[in-house]
């Protein structure tokens, strides 16, 4: 049977993202600082930000961009990114955000698939951006370099070229329920990325669903290190924090020293992270050198956070640690624990091993992979494992140009099949076990890589780890293989690693091969790129 959200229903917006986020901005909030670029220290008020968004939209309209057009956005986090992203949406166009680490070939591939007619980027990325754009026939004037020298100098318009004319934002009309606001691409951790079609309603709805649970206020300062080009940063930071009238302290990329310095300097109250950052916060000696007492909460997402690791961060930093769950196809948040753990709204606290409860206005179900039978929430303890399904207003409309993949993912009843194996408890709290496709089948048993990774990370000599299934040449069986990054100076052998894991897991879950590597390959959002490990 399906289980619904324990949280109160919310009103789902029917307006554009721009109108939902900024339509009711009053004078007091307009003068608040919205964006702080941590490296430069520059600050942008809500009033100035919205003025620049409108001018950016007007400039795009003047260059022929409007409803039905797609604009690529390739840049690290910055206030300029926020303005460009919302300027694209304000003009009625669709923003397809690209990974800042992409090569020219990657850029060309996404721009082609998305049918983008313009690309917005920054100087550090202009080489690959220009090459990628040129390879698909975009002229120089269709590649905007926000901090570049300007169109008269190198043919690429810059921010001043666009904003300087002060053109008014265009009058655009569209159906928020069907018009695409964003076209991010799935991370491709197990295969080729697909364009995820997210409407204005999808994005606005997800902000409405999570805002009462986050509890962010206008006086909060949110550390924004998660990439805005990824749906996690796009919704939870760029949109939800703006709706709260909070201040975003923006970092272009993660650096532990700068991360800690910014929390201390700007007195950040919340930080949103992925598990690799949690590892550093739990283990690195540098943490002790900073005053992090302003932090009220840390939320981890993008990959499962182990309970022991989360508890170590909570104890060390003295703030609440919770996690949530989602995916690009869900705009992205579908399950979350409030920052008080759930005490006020649910009457109980979500265990750190869980990703919390179904967001408002939505339902979930756990389905037996072998039989297709629905697994009921138990009266006590945890249910059997099954695939997590979800239905709500934040579910994407489908994959761009791929009806077959859409049908495989969203069923006739509107439930999205996440591909993640999960359990549920009696309160409806969900626990992610692992990706369905990543479960290792050893002698008929299912071995979740995430469980073994969590065990490995408790070893004091291991800085990071990942586990995949590989074929044993002797038996032909799939066996767990661990890739391990040693702590600097640690003396550790393959046998040490295997013996350590064997002490903590059932015999069939033991690691049977070990490889030491310099770094675990991960996506910008913190997901382990297991497909890359298969070539190591």
Image (cartoon, rainbow, N blue to C red):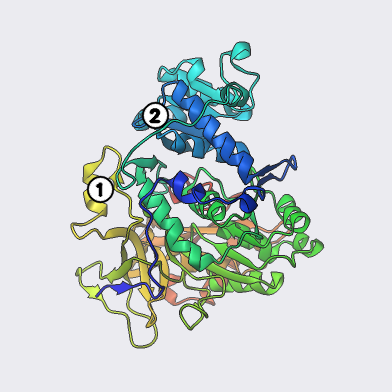
Residue at position x 21%, y 57% in the image:
411
Instruction: Kindly tell me whether residue 47 is visible in this rendering.
Output: yes
**Residue sitting farthest toward the front:** 27
**C-alpha separation, residue under disc 2 versus residue under disc 1:** 27 Å
Does label 2 or label 1 sit earlier along the sequence? 2
Instruction: Kindly tell me whether residue 81 is visible in this rendering.
Output: no
Q: Quadrant of residue 69?
A: top left
- Residue 322, numbered label: none
Quadrant location, the N terminus: bottom left
Q: How many marks?
A: 2
Above or below: residue 462 compared with residue 128: below
Please give the residue where the numbered disc 1 appears in the rendered image.
406
Q: Taking 140 as reference, is 44 left or right?
A: right
Q: Residue at x 31, y 43 (%)?
A: 175
From the viewer's perspective, is 404 left or right of 355? left
Q: Residues within 10 Å of mark 1 (few under 14, many from 20)?
A: some
* 472 in relation to 186, above or below: below
Q: Position of residue 9 (x, y in %)?
A: 38, 69
Secondary-structure class at tag 1: helix
Residue 442 screen position, x and y as percent:
35, 66
Q: Give the quarter of the image for residue 429.
A: bottom left
- Local SS, label 2: loop
Horizontal and vertical percent for residue 220?
65, 60
Q: Is residue 156 above or below residue 495?
A: above
Tell me, for residue 66, which label it has, or none.
2
Q: Residue at x 29, y 59 (%)?
A: 417
Residue 275: where, in percent of width, then height? 56, 60
């Amino acid at each position: 049977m399906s289980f619904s959200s324990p949280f109160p229903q919310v009103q789902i917006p029917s307006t554009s993202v721009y109108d939902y986020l900024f339509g009711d901005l009053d004078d007091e909030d307009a003068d608040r600082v919205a964006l702080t670029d941590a490296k430069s220290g520059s600050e942008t008020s809500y009033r100035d930000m919205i003025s620049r968004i409108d001018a950016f939209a007007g400039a795009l309209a003047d260059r022929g961009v409007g409803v039905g057009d797609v604009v690529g956005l390739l840049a690290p986090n910055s206030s300029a990114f926020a303005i460009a992203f919302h300027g694209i949406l304000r003009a009625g166009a669709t923003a397809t955000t690209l990974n800042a680490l992409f090569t020219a070939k990657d850029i060309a591939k996404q721009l082609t698939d998305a049918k983008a007619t313009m690309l917005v980027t920054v100087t550090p990325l202009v080489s690959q951006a220009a090459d990628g754009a040129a390879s698909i026939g975009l002229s120089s004037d269709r590649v905007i370099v926000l901090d570049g020298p300007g169109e008269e100098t190198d043919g690429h318009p810059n921010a001043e070229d666009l904003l300087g004319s002060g053109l008014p934002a265009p009058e655009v009309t569209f159906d928020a329920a069907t018009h695409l606001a964003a076209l991010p691409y799935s991370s491709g951790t197990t295969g080729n990325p697909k364009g995820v079609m997210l409407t204005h309603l999808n994005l606005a709805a997800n902000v409405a669903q999570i805002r009462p649970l986050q509890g962010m206020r206008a006086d909060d300062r949110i550390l924004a290190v998660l990439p805005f080009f990824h749906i996690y940063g796009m919704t939870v930071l760029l949109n939800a924090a703006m709706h709260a009238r909070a201040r975003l302290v923006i970092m272009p990329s993660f650096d532990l020293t700068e991360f800690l310095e910014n929390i201390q300097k700007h007195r950040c109250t919340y930080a949103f992270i992925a598990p690799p950052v949690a590892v550093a916060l739990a283990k690195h000696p540098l943490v002790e050198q900073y005053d992090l007492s302003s932090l009220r909460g840390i939320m981890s997402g993008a990959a499962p956070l182990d309970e022991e690791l989360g508890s170590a961060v909570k104890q060390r930093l003295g703030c609440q640690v919770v996690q949530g769950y989602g995916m690009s196809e869900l705009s992205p948040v579908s399950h979350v624990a409030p920052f008080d753990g759930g005490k006020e709204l649910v009457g109980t606290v979500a265990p750190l091993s869980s990703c919390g409860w179904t967001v408002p206005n939505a339902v979930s179900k756990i389905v037996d992979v072998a039989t297709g039978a629905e697994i009921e929430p138990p009266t006590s303890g945890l249910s059997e494992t099954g695939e997590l399904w979800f239905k709500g207003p934040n579910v994407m409309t489908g994959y761009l140009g791929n009806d077959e993949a859409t049908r495989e993912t969203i069923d006739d009843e509107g439930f999205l099949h996440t591909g993640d194996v999960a359990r549920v408890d009696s309160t409806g709290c969900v626990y992610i076990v692992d990706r369905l496709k990543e479960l290792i089948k050893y002698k008929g048993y299912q071995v979740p890589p995430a469980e073994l990774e969590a065990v490995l990370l408790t070893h004091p000599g291991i800085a990071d780890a990942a586990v995949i299934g590989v074929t044993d040449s002797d038996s032909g069986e799939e066996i767990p293989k661990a890739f391990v990054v040693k702590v600097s100076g640690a003396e550790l052998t393959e046998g040490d690693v295997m013996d350590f894991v064997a002490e903590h897991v059932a015999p069939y879950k033991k690691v049977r091969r070990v490889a030491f590597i310099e770094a675990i390959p991960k996506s910008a959002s913190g997901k382990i790129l297991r497909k890359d490990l298969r070539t190591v």
